[in-house]
Image (cartoon, rainbow, N blue to C red):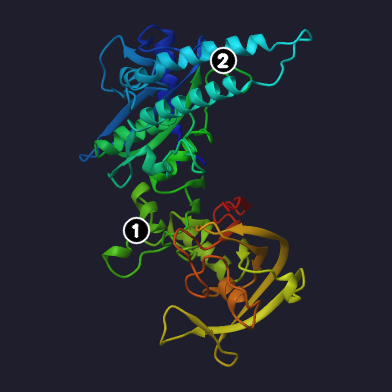
Amino acid sequence: MVFPFDEGSAYEECRQMIKEIENGFLRIETCGRVSEERAGQGVMLGALLCRNDAGEKVVLRTVSGISKKLVPVQTGNEIYVPPVVSASEIDEALAKNDRTIHELTAKINLLKEKRKLPDGKYSDMSAEEKELVEERGFLCMESQKKVFDLYSFFCADLKKRSLREICGAANFVRSGNSVEKLPPTGTGDCCAPKLLNYAYGHALVPFSICEVFYGAGTGSKTSGIICEPCEERCALILPEMLGLKILYRDKDIVVVDKQSGLLSVPGRGPDKQDCIVNRLKRLFPECIEQPSVHRLDMETSGLMVLALNAESQRNLRIQFEKSEIRKKYIAVLDGNLLKKGINRTGSMELYFRLDVDNRPHQIWDDVYGKKAVTQWQILGIESYTAPNGQKRSVTRVEFVPLTGRTHQLRLASADSHGFGVPIVGDSLYGTCAEGERLLLHACCLAFVHPATGMPMEFDCKSPF
């Protein structure tokens, strides 16, 4: 993902921070334990420029991690943002198991040394050592959970969400088959989530953000270089904080990866106002009133392009109307298409219209229906495990719609004039079990940039 806001002004602020550090007007001080592997390494400096209710510019500064802080020699108008959770709070959370973990590590190392062979290799672990390793792993997991339970973040909608809620973690069970997948250590300690948490927690409106690496360089980073949000940690939490996973943005357009279960555009009623369009307008207050140029069904995930100005919106709409925009979808169908004698590749032409007595369903009508043309390619037969644990055969299909009709791919799959096999999780034309989602994802989107005239193509891997 990329930062949602322009980097230019914030980059200049980061450069100013580096200048102040090197001239002695700003210090990076250690305020917590620094791990051995991070000793001597550089840090990320972050700046976020915002506006308050009065329209005044507010400058936020911070440094990555919890073990260091920025200390100005002279007081200015900048706000220095602390970690979301302090180093002392984290030490307190780790204290309960810390001694036991170190004792277990010492015992494990001793047993490992005893099984060292003359050639430098090691024999297999004993049952005792395996038990100690398992015990240590459980205690480490327990400690990590206590740390992560301390984290919560203010989001763009001004609501506060816990890290557990953001990452959607399940409960960890020591025995049995359920094992919680925790986020990487340090999640929430990067500059961007710290800065945005502070801004949204103080009702500030961000308009420029940037992170710059500073200090001893590594193989991939040199001092002064701009860095995008890290995929390992920030990509887990920033989309939830912002409400959108932004893959590309400039002054004219924004490309997002829409999550399943979110409306593309607002519906009727106050309960249907949370959508991609309104989330975009919340992040970009200067955006036009109607930035949408196409939409995805609420249950469908994947690529959407939106316009930030009227000229771009008109241009993209024309491209869609003329079928000049190329789209590609991945779907998982609830059955084995090859056993039904369906070719591995092909094209179908179907005719559907709205069922006025059963909205929003579409029904076959070769007289009054609108033509929907779809190309397909069967990618393979797979085993699917339902939320209740039951397994069944499914078919992974790549769809290329040449028209843009309502529910086109869902009907191409489920209707008897198409494959007669619904997409897994289709609540309208098939079945959707509890805990299941529609397995349909817009994985590729290609169009001509409305302002530059350059061809643009985006790919977004299927989450299933």
Mark earlier in primary sequence (1, 2): 2
Q: Which residue is mark 2?
A: 108
Which residue is pictured at 50% across the width and 81% down the height?
362
| Residue 112 x %, y % | 63, 13
**Label 1: element kind:** loop
Q: Residue furthest right?
A: 119
Question: For mark 1, does the 10 Å Cα neighbourhood hold few (<14), some (14 to 19), or many (20 or more) residues?
Answer: some
306 or 423: which is nearer to us? 423
**Label 2: element kind:** helix
Question: For mark 2, does the 10 Å Cα neighbourhood hold few (<14), some (14 to 19), or many (20 or more) residues?
Answer: some
Q: Amino acid at mark 2?
A: Ile
Q: Is residue 148 above or below residue 346?
A: above
Which residue is pictured at 21% across the width and 41% down the height?
53
Which residue is pictured at 45% across the width and 33% down the height?
8
Q: Amino acid at mark 1?
A: Asp
Any part of residue 241 in sight: no
Q: Residue furthest left?
A: 54
Q: Which residue is mark 1?
A: 274
Direction from residue 390 to residue 295 in the image, left or right? left
| Residue 307 x %, y % | 46, 56
Direction from residue 346 to residue 95 in the image, left or right? left
| Residue 147 x %, y % | 37, 27
